[in-house]
Each structure stands twice: as C-alpha cells, then as structure tokens.
Amino acid sequence: MSWYQTGDGGATIHVHAQPGAKRTEVVGVLGDCVKVRLAAPPVDGKANACLVEFLARRLGVKRSQVSIARGLSSRRKTVFVAGAGLQPAVLLELDGKSG
C-alpha cells in the first residue's frame, strides 16, 4: 500500500480529496493516494475539517489524533494519524459506513 506508511507514533496516509461532493466517501485508490469525496466546500477549511472528522470516525480514533501534515490548500494531502495498531484497510471498505 503506497498510500500508507507507519512511523514514529502513528501512520501517514496520502489522500486525494475531492471537495464539494454529494456525500463523504472513499472512492478507492488513485495512484499513491486514497481518493476521498468530501461533502463540504473547499472554503474556510470546511473540507479539511470534514476530512479529519471522516478519517477519525472511519479509523476509530479521536479527531485530535488526526491532523493534516501537508497540503492544507491542495487536493493532495498528507494526513498523520497518531496511535498504534491502526488498520488502514478499513478505509477501503466500501460498505456505506461513510458520512
């Protein structure tokens, strides 16, 4: 999985964000990123907040454990998730658990 790396104290996930979608969901893998549609506009950090909340819920961690490390104003983002024992494969489960 080139979109996911573990490191000191957590995991790094590469995300391709598509703001302004009808609903928030994982679409699949696009190159070396997980593509996530976001039901929030790319205005005033709303899409970034939506992404953080979605990833936290999907990975079963607190929102405070998820931060955007790189790409705040870009579609391509590097997200850091603090914590051990994360199961990144749950991001790719297209089972309707998205928000």
Image (cartoon, rainbow, N blue to C red):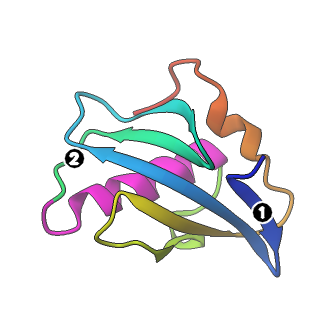
Q: Amino acid at mark 1?
A: Gln
Q: Give x and y (percent) for residue 14.
A: 58, 58
Label 1 Cα crowd, 10 Å radius (few <14 / some 14-19 / many 20+): few
Q: Quickly name the residue at label 2.
A: 40
Q: Give x and y (percent) for residue 2.
A: 74, 52
Residue 51 is covered by the magenta coloring: yes
Q: Amino acid at mark 2?
A: Ala
**Disc nearest the viewer among 2 and 1:** 1
Query: Image check: 11 left or right of 44?
Result: right
Q: Quickly name the residue at label 1.
A: 5
Count the numbered circles shown: 2
Residue at 47%, 76% (x, y): give it: 70
Residue 48 is covered by the magenta coloring: yes
Q: Which residues are magenta?
A: 43-59
Q: Give x and y (percent) for residue 80.
A: 61, 70
* Label 1: element kind: strand
